[in-house]
Image (cartoon, rainbow, N blue to C red):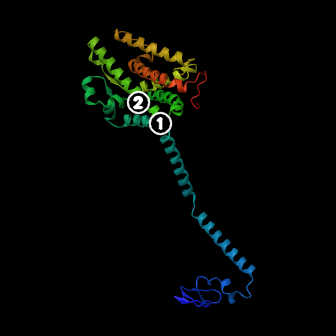
Amino acid sequence: MGECSECGKKSMSFTCRYCGEKYCSEHRLPENHDCEGLEGEKPEEHEEWFEEKFSEKKEKESKDKSSSIGKPAKYKTHRDSLSKDLINAFTGSVTLAVIAITVLSYIFQLSIPGYQELLILDTQISELLLRPWSILTVILLHGPAFHIIGNMVTFYFFASPLERMIGGKKLLKIYLTSALVASLGMILFHNALRLIHGDASMAGLVVGASGGVIALIGVIAKLYPNADVLLFFVVPMKIKTAVYGVGAFEAINMTLTLLGLEIWIFPIEFFASAGHLSGLLVGLYYGEKLKNKYKRNTGVFNPLEV
């Protein structure tokens, strides 16, 4: 506490840097107590001094900031930005997330002993009861490289526009439901073969996400019935024609198999017809439910735009 040299008030005092006297908060500024120390000082000189000091300070801060940013720091910033972009891309897209998980699982399948045995679908009831989760985890496993590549490429081109149209949650619901039904279809069909032919080997192991993937094609066929596609990436035709043609083929193949006949034409022998047909039926069902709201009567299907 001190006494103000201007008004005599006792309060917290402030010392003037020009005249050295003590003042209260009301008179602490030089212009409020007619400070003699300011006499003879030109305002212009004071302003120039302040601007010069301020400019030097900013320049010094800028140099310090520039010198602290080297090449490693820039690289780290770019790398962090790229990582964030990738994370945002995969977390913001169910389509990309499913592909990433499936590919990662395939790597585990090839490199981790026992991983495939834990997740693979064995359609024998006794084995199925030991690993009931395999009804769904079967979509995380695949056979040769062309199997997973074909599935994931097809999944991307049909799931991407569907996700933008109906949302990620509905897409995932359709995919997982159809995959589950496809597994049940394989279980029933394989065990029917076992009962008919008395051959235990006919109820065997299953891998792949084809049932869920073909279901999405069924949904798109209902929404874009006149769209042009390439069947098996080769034969051009309307998508509705391709879907019903594939469905008919799978039904015929199942019937011939039940009769003990086999079609030895590559790659038909690798087709899991029961799973494909079951998944396709689920996709057509969901497509029928969605078409009143989302149907596009167009012959142009662009997976990059909806």
Mark 1 falls on what kind of element? helix
- In this view, the residue farthest toward the left is 126
Image quarter in which the C terminus is found:
top right
Q: Earlier in the sequence, mark 2 or mark 1?
A: 1
Q: Work out how far the residue at label 2 is from the one at label 1, CA to CA, in angstroms.
A: 12 Å
Please state which amino acid type lies under the numbered disc 2: Leu
Q: Residue at x 52, y 32 (%)?
A: 160
Category of crowding for the residue at label 1, using alpha-carbon neighbours closer than 10 angstroms: few (below 14), some (14–19), many (at least 20): many
Give residue 39's position: percent from left, percent from top: 72, 88
Work out whether 48 lies above or below 4: above
Q: Residue at x 58, y 25 (%)?
A: 301
The quarter holding residue 127 reads top left
Q: Residue at x 36, y 30 (%)?
A: 136
Q: Is residue 238 left or right of residue 177?
A: right
Please state which amino acid type lies under the numbered disc 1: Val
Q: Which mark is residue 299?
A: none
Q: Is residue 40 left or right of residue 9?
A: right
Q: Do the residues under discs 2 and 1 have CB atoms within 8 angstroms?
A: no
The quarter holding residue 114 reads top left
Give residue 298's position: percent from left, percent from top: 60, 22
Give residue 18's position: percent from left, percent from top: 65, 87
Q: Which mark is residue 176?
A: 2
Q: To which residue does mark 1 refer? A: 94
Q: Residue at x 56, y 22 (%)?
A: 224
Q: Is residue 252 left or right of residue 303?
A: left
